[in-house]
Image (tube, rainbow, N blue to C red):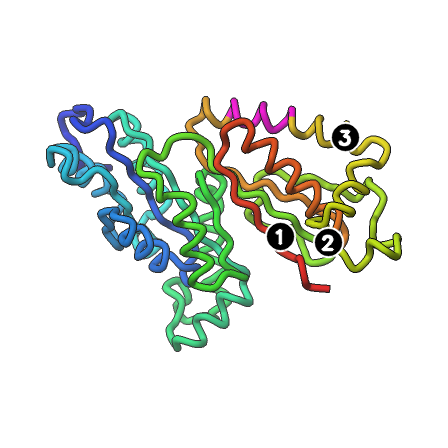
Amino acid sequence: MTTANPTGSVPTNPALDLVVITGLSGAGRSTAAKCLEDLGWFVVDNLPPSLVATMVDLASRSQGSVDRIAVVVDVRSRGFTSDVRAALAELDRMGLRARVLFLEASDDVLVRRFDSVRRPHPLQGAGLLTDGIARERQLLRDLRGEADLVVDTSVLNVHELRAKIEAAFADAAGTGLHATVISFGYKYGLPVDADIVVDCRLLPNPHWVPELRPLTGLNPQVRDYVLSQPGAREFVEAYADLLQRYEEGYAREGKHYATLAVGCTGGKHRSVAIAEELAGRLRADGVDVRVVHRDLGRE
């Protein structure tokens, strides 16, 4: 049960922006919080979920001196999942929709990170480190599915994670859709934080054209080859139309972040060219777009 806002009043500052930072231990919550703090957000670490609405109510009475709050919550709170859901529901009743930033990483990466700092996992107990990670992943499964932005930090260094956070939250107004378009190779695995996946493997592979093999999808020759194949333009148009439906739906639901993953076999030719093409379509619609070619150069 929450103790916040007993009068049920709507916050006096309707422009108040709130981000709840959560996710797996060791996935980078502290780094994300520090980044937001550097961007001018008021950051509170390890706040019990039941007190989130209380903090918002107090901030709304600050006469505008506090208009962006980031709260870090984690599984050290007893009844974590139900408490977070209750806190978000309370905020809805106050007329404020919080955005949830969820950070995660692969099990092997988390194990290496915990080993490097010689600390036990908060849910490990008398068991193994991997047992604690598994318990936490299960506990957070539903919350991850409801998050506005999921960031997988497995292959990100501190600077790359900061760049992602800045791209998503540097805009104080927090309005509009922010999209990350990632090209990838299926042989290296699907990006785990993808909201939408586009499979380009139905298009002919420039890898089998000797003069195009050493080039990438950023090269005009490769781009023209990919887009000139039978059905390629129709393929792009169909996905561009689908993305417009997503934009409209996300706007209705108040979702501000989306990750579009575009894949081919190796992430070098087709996916890169199609990712750039779709990113251009999104920009033309007024979407703030960041393009990442995850597997370019891995061959």
Location of residue 227 (image quadrant): top right
The image shows residue 219 at horizontal and vertical percentages of: 72, 50
**In front: 131, or 293?**
293
Q: For the residue carrying disc 1, how many other residues have a C-alpha within 10 Å: few (<14), some (14-19), or many (20+)? A: many
Sequence-first disc among 2 and 1: 2
287 lies above or below 122: above
**Mark 2 highlights which residue?**
216
- At label 3, counting other C-alpha atoms closer than 10 Å, the crowd grade (few under 14, some 14-19, many 20 or more) is few
Residue 197 location (% of width, % of height): 65, 40
Query: What quarter of the picture does the C terminus occupy?
Result: bottom right
| Left or right: 123, with 226 as reference point | left
Q: Which residues are magenta?
A: 241-249
Task: Write the residue at 11% across / 36% down.
Answer: 62
Type of amino acid at the residue the image marks with label 2:
Thr
Magenta stretch: includes residue 248: yes
Question: Which residue carries the number 3 mark?
Answer: 233
Q: Residue at x 24, y 50 (%)?
A: 43
Give the percent coordinates (x, y) of residue 26: 42, 63
For the residues labelled 1 and 3, say whether their Cβ atoms are less than 8 Å apart. Answer: no
For mark 3, give the secondary structure: helix
Dots 2, 1 in contact, CB < 8 A: yes
Give whichever of discs 1 and 3 has the lower sequence position: 3
Q: CA distance from mark 1 to mark 3?
A: 21 Å
User: Which numbered disc flags the more N-terminal residue, 2 or 3?
Assistant: 2
Is 7 placed above or below 291 here?
A: above
Q: Looking at numbered disc 3 in the image, what kind of residue is underneath it?
A: Arg
In whole angstroms, how far apart are the C-alphas of marks 2 and 1? 11 Å
Which three-letter amino acid code belongs to the residue tagged 1? His
| Tag shown at residue 293 | 1
Asked whether 52 falls inside the magenta stretch, the response is no
> Outermost residue toward the front?
220
* Residue located 37% across and 38% down the image: 99
